[in-house]
Amino acid sequence: MYQQMIFVNLATHDLDAAKKFFTELGYTINDQFSDDKTASVVISDAIVAMVHTRPRYAEFTKKEIADAKKTSEVLLALSAESRGKVDELVDKAVAAGGSIAGETQDHGFMYGRSFDDLDGHTWEVVWMDPSAVEG
């Protein structure tokens, strides 16, 4: 069966810093689809973040590029396999230079935290109890 993928395209002010940040979170850079203007960050088999320098990103749009430190253009949400994995990823992001974005959400059956990456893009990391989804 065909597995649909998502390629999230993000602008960065500093490509080298962005690559270092995402590899410190445990993700890999796919060199086949990366160059001096773009980093292909492999998050999972189905999720890839294409991080572009601002001039490269501008090649794909006629719109003004949002400054994610000042405006919110998107909230990126990633699932996690456990509450501990939520904390682990967010703690890695903060240690790598990111910052906490918002309050921890703990609803018992669902737990989430969020962080802003170096460019201000907000990433939410959420765990949901599988039994809550089934019921």
Image: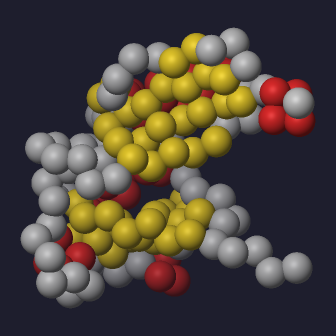
Q: Residue at x 16, y 59 (%)?
A: 66
Residue 84 appears left or right of 113: right
Image quarter for residue 69?
Answer: top left
Q: Count numbered badges in the picture.
A: 0
Q: Residue at x 12, y 44 (%)?
A: 70
Q: Residue at x 14, y 76 (%)?
A: 63
Residue 66 appears left or right of 104: left
- Is residue 4 among what the camera can see? yes
79 relative to 34, above or below: above
Color style of the picture: secondary structure
- Is residue 119 among what the camera can see? no
Residue 17 appears left or right of 63: right
- Residue 93 x %, y %: 42, 34
90 relative to 61, above or below: above
Comparing 119 with 96, the one in front is: 119
Q: Residue at x 14, y 54 (%)?
A: 67
- Residue 132 x %, y %: 81, 27
The quadrant in which the N terminus is found is bottom right
78 relative to 67, above or below: above
18 relative to 130, above or below: below
The quadrant in which the C terminus is found is top right
Residue 102 appears left or right of 42: left
Comparing 18 with 50, the one in front is: 50
- Residue 12 x %, y %: 23, 60
